[in-house]
Amino acid sequence: MLVIQHNCRKTYAITIAALETGLKLNAAFICLQEPYIGPNQHISHPGYTLYWPEAGEHKNKRVTIAVRRDLITQLIIEARTDLIDHPYALAIDIWDLQQDTRTRKRRTRLINIYDNRIGLGTCYQSDANRSWRAIEDITWNTLLRGRAVLLGDFNAHSPAWNPLISRRIDAGPLEQLIKDYNLILNNEPGAITRPGKDNRGSIIDLTFTTEELGPLELWAIETEWPTPSDHELIVLEWTDIDNIPIIPNKGEITGWDIDKLKQDPETYEKAKEKWRYLALYRPIIDYNSQKEDLESEAIWIEESLTKILNQFAKPLRITAFSKRWWNSEIQEARSHYAKARRDFKLICGDNTEVNRARNDYYITVRKAKRKCWQDFLQGVIEDDSISLDNQRCWTALKYTSPRALSTTPTVKGNSGEVAITLEQKEELFLASQFPKAHGNELSEPIIPQDGGIELITDQVIQNALLSQSIKKAPGLDRLNFKAIRLLWEWDQERIIALIRHCFRLGYQPNRWKIAKGIIIRKPNKSNYILAKHYRTISLLNCLGKVVEKVAAEILSKRCERLELLHNGQFGSRKSRGAIDAIAKLIATVEHAWKHKKIAGALFLDVKGAYPNVIRQQLIKRLVELGIPGDLIRWVNSFLTDRKVQLVIDGYTCPVRDIEIGVPQGSPISPILFIIYISGFFDAIEAKIPIISLSFADDIGLIAIESSIREVTKTLEQAGEEAINWGLQNSISFEVDKTEAVLFTKKRKLAKEVS
């Protein structure tokens, strides 16, 4: 397992150069000390997934570990923030897998540290009136167990690791650590890791291993691909399990290049003809078909289209690749800098040429970045997914906005349970994102037999398919909307028949009900050690999403035409966005002021929202609203026997059953949810003199009275009624997100509130 170790001096060009060297040398891991930290976000790279400490402010983090993207599926990586959660140190467990069973076989712990003085008078301070070394903050007896590599920039000097000196500076804590745990020093004796003037320097970048791991197979200073850092770039390696090296494969196939297929008329016609041949003896779904025929058809379409794309289209894979602006000019400047450094070491002369080569390298990097960015904004760089100027502007905004990390640390549940391993994280996320059903005693509502299939026209199906963005990620079948549109060009009749009869039979094929669950971080949270600070996005079968979109459009139009939803419900409705909800709130408050009244509001948040929707309750509400029976039966089938396969840190978990909830990521989930809670508003307003507003799962109850006492009393009554209604309808509210607000122009009234 090849690893790179390097101090980047908090510089962008050096950090990227180290990561690019990792690609060049096929390094599986890159341990960086003092990496570049942007003003608003962590640095990223298309070739590596970066793990960062969770503790500390963004600006104070001093280490990161980069894992090569195309190796994530071949290993299990677990961030051990339960053992060490410090801005100056980071540990991950690397699990080698048994190739045939994909079970864990061997664990190696990789610990990256930037050791320096912290506390009083340093950049990383605390309340303590003293300073100390970072390694003194760490509990080592639980960390240095089994196979472990401890490496980093230790900023300490001692004859114990540098035979060229006799003095000791800040070496006590590290010397004691080496003694206590019998650590093995792997540095080449006398190899300078931080060169200084007159070709003299120090040895402060160190690599240790535990006795269980033993000496490393390789430890060397990389001379062919140096960076402008004043620290050497170090390469190390331990023996692969069973002496079988883990080599980056071609990468997992995530889809196919449909655009290139369509640009090649000859290949496109061959693919089209292949489909016609396969479909020739395959009957189209008709009124004699049953549910099992729908299931069989869904499977056949998926397998046949996949077979054709595998044969005629270029596969798209997860691969490690360079930054777009990393070009030949940069590599040439880097080679010149490497030669200047080698010559300087041999001659021990003036370092003017080294400094000039390093500055030229920096300038070349800045020019390349600037040119790449300008070319992108001007449309010079071709990107098939960005064809319009306004799309390019939004993409540029996305590139410059803070992005959430895709990795997970050790996570805690609501009851304090700790999830360290991937299996434990899966169990915790399943419990928090996909709760178990508590309504098994609920009876199945009687669904009327009043049709609805007549609403499913060819035009409705076409609009549902073509209105969906081609940029949406596919489900487990990897067939995105570009592939579905390709199928539409080849065989519209088959798709229309399948979708129409899904509603006739009130059935959603099980093949389309298995979601790929991507765990992402909710934005703007103080920390991400709590499971509730994550959400799961369900990536669903795109052909199934066409059916869901059809149902969503028909439901929405019917609800609006017949005014089935409360007038104060905003969000998930056309022309009723967040701005409209705020405008109505402002208008309500100002109307109260105009009549010399006081307005107050109680803001509630529906707990869990989508994951806690109970199927029987939703079906009951749809029946109450008079939704056509065919549509209700399809919704009932859509929410029955759902499954999910979570993806955590790149690792795909087994398929699990989902008992309740609507999938986050489905076109129909938003309208189903607001229908689910639509009865709340009329029920509260019928008993309490309040005005109700909502945006999706955020609810506001507004009271207008003559005094603060009356406002408070009305809101208390409204809150009690809300809780009671929730208990009767299996809905609860987030206590810590509940807020009461008083709207008044009179500042003196604030004293009455307190």
Image (cartoon, rainbow, N blue to C red):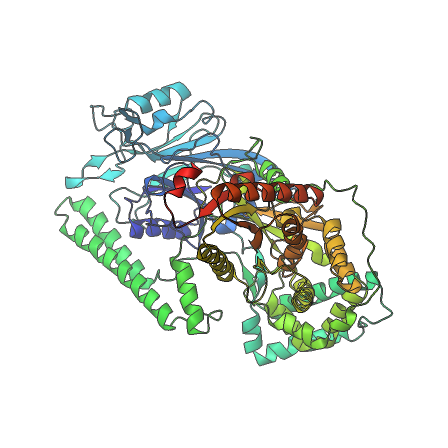
| Number of numbered callouts drawn | 0
Q: Position of residue 708 (x, y in %)?
A: 48, 43
Residue drawn at (21%, 58%) of the image = 360
Horizontal side of residue 206 vs 705, given as left or right: left
Quarter of the rendering containing residue 9: top left
Q: Position of residue 408 (x, y in %)?
A: 50, 42
Quick one: quadrant of the C terminus?
top left
Q: Nearer the viewer, residue 721 or 226?
A: 721
Quarter of the rendering containing residue 322: bottom left
Quarter of the rendering containing residue 32: top left
Q: Nearer the viewer, residue 395 or 173?
A: 395
Q: Is residue 341 above or below residue 554?
A: above
Q: Nearer the viewer, residue 518 or 706?
A: 706
Camera sees residue 317: yes
Q: Position of residue 7 (x, y in %)?
A: 31, 42
Residue furthest to the left in view is 350
Residue drawn at (34%, 20%) of the image = 176
Residue drawn at (73%, 55%) of the image = 621
Q: Is residue 108 above or below residue 458?
A: above
Q: Position of residue 192 (x, y in %)?
A: 25, 36
Q: Nearer the viewer, residue 246 or 453?
A: 453
Horizontal side of residue 145 vs 661, given as left or right: left
Camera sees residue 102: no
